[in-house]
Amino acid sequence: MRLTAARALVRWLVAQRGALLDGTEVPLFPGVFAIFGHGNVLGLGTALSEQPDLPVWRGHNEQGMALAAVGYAKATHRRQVGVATSSIGPGALNMVTAAGVAHANRLPLLLLPGDTFVNRAPDPVLQQVEHFDDATATVNDAFRAVSRYFDRITRPEQLIATLPQVARVLTDPADCGPVTLALPQDVQADAFDFPDVLFEPVVHHVPRPRPDRHALARVADAVAASRRPLLVLGGGVRYSGATHRALAFAERHGVPVVETTAGRTLVPHDHPLHAGPLGITGSASANALAAEADLVLAVGTRLQDFTTASWSVFAPDVRLVTVNTARFDAVKHGALALVADADEALGELAGLLDSWRISASWTARAGVERSRWDAYVDGLREPAAGPPTYAQVVGVVNEESAPGDYVMTASGGLPGELIGGWRAPGGAEPGMDVEYGFSCMGYEIAGAWGAAMAFSAARPSGVVTTLLGDGSYLMLNSELFSAAFAGHGFVAVVCDNDGYAVIDRLQRGNGAPGFNNMYADARTLQTRPPRVDFASHAAALGAAVLSVLDLADLREAYRQARDHARAGRVAVVVVRTHPSSWTDAGAWWEVGVPEHSAYPAVTDARRTSDKAKSDQVRYLAHP
């Protein structure tokens, strides 16, 4: 059929189907987030307007709408893919950050930025940057560093070859990540006789690679030889739908279980083998077991530095065994690698281990250590004088939430509070999204819009709640209006602590004076600098707003906000919070403390850091 490149692309998007973890067939591309400009409004914009089966949602910042697409993908466990399109120039470059978020977190995202004219007749075109030594370069080449797959479509028929590769990357458990198709605006409008078969419906089932039998035997021998094993569950367990298999494995053999950031809420909090979340933003309970484990079985995780406390959380002689669909991740740190789907690998591994079981004393350590951590968190949640702390805010949201709800955050101090303090109920799908692979300020609101959109179709009774600080709110709040306008309700709890408090903590904690993070330490020519009225601002963007002064008011305000969210309205709860009260898992993190400084306390901090670094496990070699 004769179609323009834009119409062919849109028709192909509609024909692609996906399958959820329970087998339910859904659109692979459930919608498009769009801001139109001269680079995409006529070609792709016209094609989208002609296709009612592909909903188009208007964004108000290109980064924000692309982050919403990322949030949608995370909420559907990578089974559906958000699409975002922009014009060339600043609109396209605004999406580069969102591509970085998707790339770091291994999440699918399809970006369709407009591009300059291939025919070069109107040269240079508006918003075109010119490279004196490369006539083919445009701003879209900036996406190459943050894309799993990149292509510039310079002829319509190129879509025939590239679209299968687009589907491959977006649905591959190992290579999953952002795809960028740069679309020159003249090529979008050019026509070609496309084969009908390109537009036949296709259902994409995410592959489940099974483990190599020789590698599986080696892993089984290593696990069977351990006496104090620890099972680490990451995001790959979530995307595989392997939670039940992982818990059955742990229960059969008596292995304590801990979670990474991406694996958080996979395990019910009160499960007897649950030792808590691992790492800097995790729990002292999980870290205590990690320090004594003689074998770590890490499933579906790339073990980034926050999870491993910069590779200081494990014993120096620990045996590291990894299960991952991506060989790139599996072989890191000299691990004994098993390249396979988490569900398939754990099932086959359990069959080889048969009646192997570890000592009851090590099994019991999970509950003992977690009870100590629970007591610590209980103490942090107790009402006290002064503004509410992050831990207290998280406690209220946690206690008022229900199975099937979804809680989110991204950057600043709240990831540590949410990861370390949240208590997941049993009998529900994973209910947390902490974007701490890229730690992108602004994801909290935009990602919540995408998650709320996904929930409106799949879990209409669930409530999406995002927690964020004043810094993140000011960084990117435009999609608050996008969600309010579209009618996708969620709750945003805005914690105002007068600045970038967690970075101030890092700064002061390493001997430096407070500088340019808290408003009190930032330069101003005003004798009485203004304060942001978050409540008025959120109300102006169409949100229902509830302002609270203390912890007692927060609970009722959050209950009301949940009612608004269920009715399809965005609700914002604004609360002043304590600027320097934190949950502490007692782990170390390597940061660049200066070797020389005018501040003696910085030099002291460097000596402390050097001492901690001497215990860092640089490479975990296996025999």
Image: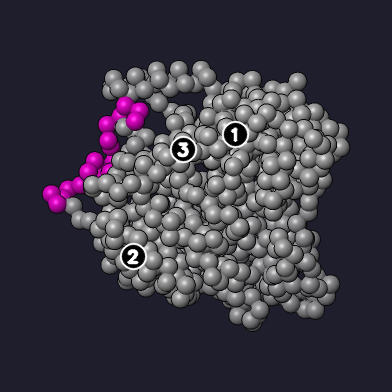
> Which of labels 3 and 2 is toward the front?
3
Q: Which residues are magenta?
A: 509-528
- Give the foreground label among 1 and 3: 1
Residue positioned 77% across, 32% down in the render: 356
Residue 458 pos. (x, y %): 61, 69
Asked if residue 527 lies in the magenta stretch, the reply is yes
Q: How is the image coloured?
A: one colour
Q: Is residue 363 above or below residue 97?
A: above
> Circle 2 is placed at which residue position?
557
Judging depth in this view, the residue of 105 and 567 nearest the camera is 567
Q: Which residue is mark 1?
A: 364
Q: Residues within 10 Å of mark 1 (few under 14, many from 20)?
A: some
Q: Which residue is mark 3?
A: 373
Q: CA distance from mark 1 to mark 3?
A: 15 Å
Image quadrant containing the C terminus? top right
Nearer to the camera, 231 or 414: 231
Q: Looking at the image, can residue 218 be seen?
A: yes
SS label for mark 3: helix
Asked which quadrant contains residue 484, the reply is: bottom left
What secondary structure is marked by label 2? helix
Q: Which mark is residue 550?
A: none
- Separation (CA) of disc 2 from disc 1: 40 Å
The residues bearing labels 3 and 2 have C-alpha atoms spaced at a distance of 28 Å
Percent coordinates x, y for residue 24 in the rendering: 72, 68
